[in-house]
Image (cartoon, helix red, strand yellow):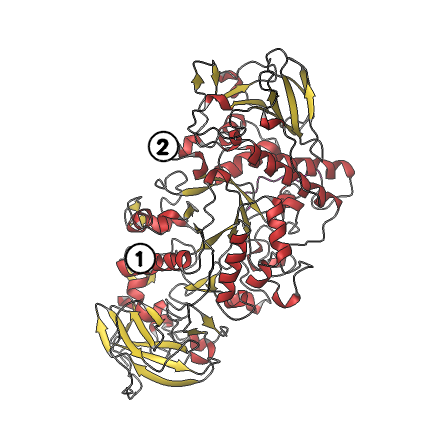
């Protein structure tokens, strides 16, 4: 047959009960009397709605959508209701060389489906072409894929939210806690086994109480949109654990719903909000699970391939692959842009989430000539009355041309700052020529973000993330150990900036273990005392290990799950981190709303930040450029910052001493007025937080590889509220 001709569609009698319906809203919408079905496809010749039994296993009938308005196929079924399982078969030209891959033999998921049921079973029938055919994807496959694919399901959106409302934690008090929804509770002893790894597990009172007592303000959940397992992983007994393989932008991942109802997700959000915790979703709008030209036909490829995906201009059979996963969604098309913004608004308004972290966000702002902050998607987010009130966080890079855009996103966005990660790791590892850059990161990365009214919180500071070593592994391994991934240790980055401190992996040497723990305390203290928005990774606060695996994307196992059985060192680190968080919240100067630029307050003759040498003198250009210099004092004076409303502790004076040298270094504490004194709040050489005071103009020796924090107790303010002790809750 001529592959460019339309395939012969099955003969279907259109039931008389189908009505015209409306072209909006897209998706399947229950109105209390029936269901309106609407599907966008600019190039289809016909669309069939396929109805299935409650389980989604047996196809009951096919109904041709009767109307086509403004590129929307639509119809209304008065006898349909919530719970109805359905899919689509879309007719049109099968002409891969022209970008069209219609094949009505393939059952397709509704891109706007609010719920999916059933699991994908990998089969050659999933592909629009005949696998193994000499013509590859130019061939045409007639097998029915319906038995092997999940089905879309009509939902009843009703939910009693009660008094729930957005938490709206100010950026300066925001502390992100990145976690996999499944992995955080799979080994939690208080969570019933039946709901571990689900929304019901995450809203367990003991889990929420732990998060509240830790002091974080927001959960940043790895993808919860419906995603698919990769065939090659299933064949090796693994699966896609992280979830960066989306197939449904409106539906929660089915495995995350213990009850099988989307209300479970809403209930989880309500419980987290009640505890003062925001919910931020890691979202993947840059590609889908359909892969490249040799991938399966599951949804958008079969609905309108030439519209949904960016195709190579000189070879539309092939896909633009800026995501590195085979395909790239085309947000330059208004209907694809609408789908993405509709999805975001749905999660913000109907599911009550508080913000989004955008995977490979550079793709979302790429025009044919390169990244452009005036791309329709970025403009839409900034002007949308709903989205502009949520927290918007970009992962500001991808593998496409000009893909690295840290600091390049427009106002209103925060960005993952990998320069913070790399600089802090290298500095504490002992690399040369890192001191000046380390100071920039401590001060909020003004070199990247101090423009157009952006604030320090635009920098999302992190030392570790889901992708890479855990904090414990960062100080325990010189190289990755991804053998469990069965890719001959070729996967995962080799640029880890890690240091094993003398032994690769676990050690019985008490000195090595003590140094590793001190380095973890150093890294945590640097993260939480830096200007910007800190992000912790779940489990780092009690020294979780992945045994050297820096790419656990496929490890839905004890490698990827949190182990809540803490040893003494893990508990001590957890207590230490809790105290660090409380110190950050106690002193607004550690989370200023303006960049530290060394500005002088003329009346008081003070500066917002002063950089000092161990001798107590101000840093000079020569000292900044010294190759082996690893010591620094950072003097912060809150009185130098103009403020409209004086907050408790906002005018504090703090002194941060940093010694990444391997030997002890003597520091001269800055002179203070008579009667005033320096009060030590923290010393990372100590596994616990212990306060002490030191006399006027005293010297203080700092252990190698340590960080200390002091507060100035001024004689003219004996009742200063910052004199209150750090509050660390009991275990």
Q: Label 2 neighbourhood size at 10 Å, few (<14), some (14-19), many (20+)?
A: few
Q: Residue at x 38, y 35 (%)?
A: 454
Quadrant housing residue 723? top right
Task: Quadrant for the N terminus, please.
Answer: bottom left
Tell me, yes or no, if residue 227 can be seen here: yes
- On screen, 354 above or below 680? below
Q: Nearer the viewer, residue 618 or 268?
A: 268
Quadrant housing residue 512? top right
**Residue 514: where, in percent of width, then height?**
73, 37
Q: Main secondary structure of the magenta part?
A: loop
For disc 2, the marked residue is: 451
- State left or right for residue 179 relative to residue 345: right
Q: Which mark is residue 337?
A: 1
- State left or right for residue 77 relative to residue 658: left
Q: Nearer the viewer, residue 312 or 411?
A: 411
Tell me which label, 2 or 1, sits earlier in the chain. Answer: 1
- State left or right for residue 224 relative to residue 516: left
Q: Which mark is residue 350?
A: none
**Residue 537: where, in percent of width, then height?**
57, 47
The answer to whether the residues at label 2 and label 1 have Cβ atoms under 8 Å apart is no
Mark 2–mark 1 Cα distance, whole angstroms, equals 28 Å
Is 22 colored magenta in this rendering?
A: no
Q: How many marks?
A: 2
Local SS, label 2: loop
**Residue 378: where, in percent of width, then height?**
32, 48
Task: Quadrant for the C terminus, please.
Answer: top right
Task: Please provide the residue range marked out in magenta.
Answer: 494-502
**Residue 295: where, in percent of width, then height?**
41, 67
Tell me, yes or no, if residue 248 can be seen here: no
Local SS, label 1: helix
């Amino acid at each position: 047959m001529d592959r460019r001709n339309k395939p012969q569609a099955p003969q279907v009698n259109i039931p008389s009960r189908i009505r015209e319906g409306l072209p909006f809203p897209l998706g399947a919408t229950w109105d209390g009397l029936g269901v309106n079905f609407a599907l966008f496809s600019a190039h289809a010749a016909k669309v069939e709605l396929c109805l299935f039994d409650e389980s989604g296993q047996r196809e009951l009938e096919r109904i041709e959508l009767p109307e086509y308005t403004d590129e929307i196929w639509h119809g209304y079924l008065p006898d349909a209701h919530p719970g109805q399982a359905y899919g689509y078969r879309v007719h049109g030209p099968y002409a891969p060389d022209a970008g069209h891959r219609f094949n009505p033999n393939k059952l397709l998921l509704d891109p706007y489906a609010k719920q999916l049921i059933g699991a994908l079973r990998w089969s050659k029938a999933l592909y629009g072409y005949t696998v193994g055919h000499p013509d590859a994807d130019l061939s045409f496959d007639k097998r029915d894929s319906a038995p092997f694919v999940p089905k879309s399901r009509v939902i009843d959106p009703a939910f009693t939210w009660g008094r729930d409302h957005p938490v709206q934690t100010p950026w300066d008090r925001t502390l992100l806690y990145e976690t996999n929804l499944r992995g955080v509770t799979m080994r939690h002893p208080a969570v019933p086994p039946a709901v571990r790894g689900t929304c019901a597990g995450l809203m367990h009172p003991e889990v929420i109480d732990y998060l509240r007592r830790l002091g974080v303000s927001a959960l940043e959940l790895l993808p919860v949109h419906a995603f698919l397992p990769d065939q090659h992983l299933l064949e090796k007994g693994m699966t896609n654990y992280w979830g960066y393989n989306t197939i449904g932008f409106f539906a929660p991942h089915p495995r995350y719903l213990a009850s099988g109802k989307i209300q479970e997700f809403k209930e989880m959000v309500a419980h987290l909000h009640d505890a003062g915790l925001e919910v931020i979703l890691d979202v993947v709008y840059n590609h889908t699970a359909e892969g490249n030209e040799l991938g399966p036909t599951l949804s958008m490829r079969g609905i309108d391939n030439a519209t949904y995906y960016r195709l190579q201009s000189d070879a539309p059979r092939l896909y633009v692959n800026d995501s590195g996963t085979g395909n790239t969604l085309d947000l330059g098309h208004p209907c694809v842009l609408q789908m993405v913004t509709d999805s975001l608004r749905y999660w913000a308004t109907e599911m009550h989430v508080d913000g989004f972290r955008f995977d490979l966000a550079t793709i979302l702002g790429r025009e044919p000539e390169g990244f452009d902050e005036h791309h329709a998607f970025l403009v839409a987010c900034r002007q949308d009355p709903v989205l502009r009130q949520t927290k918007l966080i970009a992962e500001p890079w991808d593998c496409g041309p000009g893909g690295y855009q840290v600091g390049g996103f427009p106002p209103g966005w925060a960005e993952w700052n990998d320069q913070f990660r790399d600089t802090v790791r290298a500095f504490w590892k002992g690399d040369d020529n890192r001191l000046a850059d380390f100071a920039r990161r401590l001060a909020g990365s003004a070199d990247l973000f101090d423009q157009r009214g952006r604030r320090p919180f635009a920098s999302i500071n992190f030392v570790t993330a889901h992708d890479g070593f855990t904090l414990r592994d960062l100080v325990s391994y010189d190289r990755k150990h991804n053998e469990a991934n069965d890719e001959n240790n070729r996967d995962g980055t080799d640029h880890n900036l890690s240091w094993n401190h003398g032994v690769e992996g676990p050690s019985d040497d008490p000195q090595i273990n003590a140094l590793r723990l001190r380095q973890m305390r150093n890294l945590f203290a640097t993260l939480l005392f830096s200007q910007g928005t800190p992000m912790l990774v779940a489990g780092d606060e009690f020294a979780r290990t992945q045994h050297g695996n820096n790419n656990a994307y496929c490890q839905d196992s004890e490698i990827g799950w949190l182990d809540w059985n803490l040893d003494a060192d893990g508990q001590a680190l957890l207590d230490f981190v809790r105290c660090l968080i409380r110190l950050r919240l106690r002193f607004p100067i550690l989370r200023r709303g303006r960049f530290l630029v060394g500005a002088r307050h003329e009346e008081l003759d003070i500066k917002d930040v002063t950089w000092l040498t161990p001798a107590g003198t101000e840093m000079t250009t020569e000292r900044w450029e010294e190759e082996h210099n690893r010591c620094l004092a950072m003097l912060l004076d809150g009185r130098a910052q103009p403020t409209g409303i004086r907050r408790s502790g906002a005018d504090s004076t703090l002194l941060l001493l940093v010694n990444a040298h391997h030997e002890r270094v003597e520091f001269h504490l800055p002179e203070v007025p008579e009667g005033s004194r320096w009060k030590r709040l923290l010393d990372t050489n100590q596994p616990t937080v212990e306060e002490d005071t030191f006399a006027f103009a005293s010297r203080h020796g700092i252990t190698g590889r340590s960080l200390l924090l002091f507060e100035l107790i001024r004689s003219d303010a004996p009742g200063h509220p910052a004199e209150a002790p750090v509050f660390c809750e009991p275990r």
